[in-house]
Amino acid sequence: MSKNTAETWHQDFYDDLFAQHCLQRSDKEVNEAVDFLMDKLSLKAGMRFFDQGCGLGTLSLALARKGLHVTGVDLIDSYITRAQAEAAAENLACDFHTGNAYDFTPSKPCDAAINWWTSFGYSENDDKNILMMQRIFETLKPGGFFGFDYKNGARVLKDFAQSNTLRDVAEKDGHKTVWESRYEPDTNMVYKDWIYTAPDGTHQENKGGGAKLYTAEDITHLLTGAGFVNIKFYGDMQGGAFDPDTSIRCITISEKPAGA
């Protein structure tokens, strides 16, 4: 089954089957992210927090368990429904919304915010992508922190040095997942298709949209263009130094000026 239109690829690509097999995070990965964010964003119980592109609410829920008041937004309604149900079951201080991150801001100013696990760069146009950072800037209180986690574009380009198409295969308990990635130099975008085969042979193919590659210099330009200052780079969620040649991730912590 193939599903895709230019206007609705997000809704088609990020379905419940994709969430089951590709969006589940290990406890170790979640705990590392939470520890990193609590430290680098100077988070404390009672603070207001915004998770832009929250997906299933994995980080939102984990941070709410630390006592934060969390607002999350995502375009996929079924993911928000799942996050709302989990928050209600645990009586967590979470407020989840289905919405477009280019437009959405929480109803109350926040002490900190994140865009995490590559929930960014969906347009070829930088002026479009920066809108998400601008919404974060508007959301934050003066002096508030923004955590941004993205692919290191310089490192990704090395993977495409020999070919503009890459293929990754994962198999577990009879379930087979294939990622096909295509790099288009003219737009500097990477497009991904996801192909899933169940143990009974049932086959589903989801054709995704793209994510633009950004180097550390590009990300600095976007953040400063949105108004952020005091940008710090990290190469992983253990707080390791960022290396443009070897780091898989490009993680930044930046700040809204105190007088803004």
Image (cartoon, grey):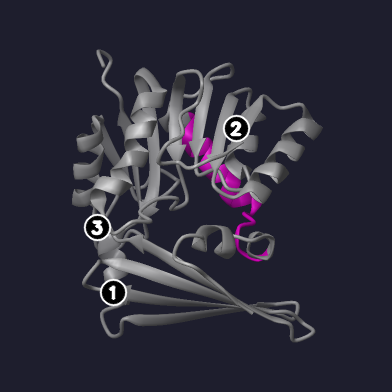
Residue 249 picture location, percent across and down: 37, 55
Q: Which mark is residue 184?
A: 1
Cα separation between marks 2 and 3: 29 Å
The residue that appears at 18% across and 50% down in the rendered structure is 217
Left/right of residue 110 with respect to residue 129 in the rendered view: right
Range covered by the magenta-colored residues? 21-38
Cα distance in 3D space between marks 1 and 3: 21 Å
Does the magenta portion include 30?
A: yes
* 68 shown above or below 197: above
Return the disc, 2 or 3, that comes first in the chain's sequence.
2
Residue 51, position in %: x, y?
A: 51, 36
**Looking at the magenta stretch, what is its main secondary structure?**
helix
Image quadrant where one finds the C terminus: top left
Q: Marks 2 and 3: which is nearer the front? A: 2
Q: Is residue 30 above or below residue 187?
A: above
Mark 3 lies on residue: 244
Label 2 neighbour load within 10 Å: few <14, some 14-19, many 20+: many
Which residue sits at x=71%, y=37%? 84
Q: Is residue 85 magenta?
A: no
Q: Mark 1: which secondary structure?
A: strand
The amino acid sitting under disc 2 is Leu
Mark 2–mark 3 contact, CB under 8 Å?
no
What amino acid type is highlighted by mark number 3? Answer: Pro
Question: Circle 2 — which element?
Answer: helix
Categorize mark 3 by other alpha carbons within 10 Å: few (<14), some (14-19), many (20+).
Answer: some
Q: Amino acid at mark 1?
A: Glu
Q: Earlier in the sequence, mark 2 or mark 1?
A: 2
Nearest to N terminus: mark 1 or mark 3: 1
Gap in Å between the C-alphas at discs 2 and 1?
Answer: 37 Å
Q: Would you name the residue on which mark 2 appears? A: 63
Observer-nearest residue: 207 or 6? Answer: 6
User: Closest to the observer: 67 or 107?
Assistant: 107
